[in-house]
Image (spheres, helix red, strand yellow):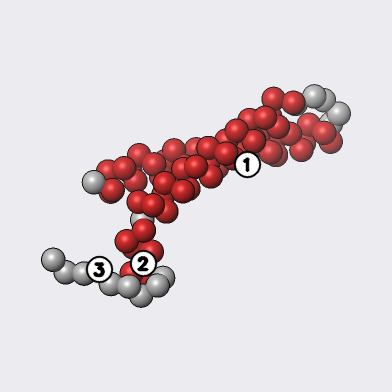
Amino acid sequence: MNNKKLKILNPIMFIAIFTTFVAMLTYKISGFFNYDAYGFKELHEICGFIFVILAIFHIVYNWQWIKSQIFGIKPKKK
């Protein structure tokens, strides 16, 4: 079940982080050329917040793998 959720979650996470990055670059470049790009600052903040929330879900869905690979805790056999 988690695999199906991750197939949806991972592309959305990519879009959120990519949009965050592009909005940040656009906002910073706009300051260099002295034009107002206020909407990009807010887009950067909103997409960054969405990414953080999605990253939490990503960790929750991958927790069994994290426990086995990082902490060395193998799942119990039923």
Identify which amino acid the numbered label 2 is placed on: Lys
Pair 1/3: label in front = 3
Q: Residue at x 73, y 34 (%)?
A: 27
Q: In the rendered structure, are the residues bearing label 2 and label 3 in contact, judged by CB atoms less than 8 Å apart?
A: yes
Q: Where is residue 16 in the image (x, y as percent from the top left)?
A: 52, 38
Amino acid at pointer 1: Phe
**How far separated are the C-alphas under marks 2 and 3?**
8 Å
Of the two numbered discs 2 and 3 on the same chain, state the one appearing first in sequence.
Answer: 2
Mark pair 1, 3: CA separation: 37 Å
Q: Is residue 5 left or right of residue 55?
A: left
* Image-based side of 12 in relation to 45, left or right: left
Q: Where is residue 34 in the image (x, y as percent from the top left)?
A: 86, 28
Residue 18 visible in this rendered orientation of the protein: no
Residue under numbered circle 3: 75
For label 1, the crowd category at 10 Å Cα-Cα, with few meaning under 14, some 14 to 19 and many 20 or more, is: some
Q: Quadrant of residue 42?
A: top right
List the residue tagged with mark 1: 21
Taking the spot 41% from the left edge, 70% from the top edge, the residue there is: 70
Q: Residue 5 carries which label?
A: none
What x and y, as percent, mark residue 26? 71, 34
Name the spot of residue 47 as percent of width and height, x first.
Answer: 57, 35
Label 2 near label 1: C-beta < 8 Å?
A: no
**Circle 2: element type:** helix
Q: What element carries label 3?
A: loop
**Label 1 residue SS:** helix
In the rendered view, tell whether residue 54 sits above or below residue 60: above
Residue at the image point whose x is 46% and y is 48% from the top: 56
Residue pointed to by mark 2: 67
- Residue at horizontal 36 percent and vertical 56 percent from the top: 62
Q: Nearer the viewer, residue 25 or 48?
A: 48
Q: Distance between the residues labelled 1 and 2?
A: 30 Å
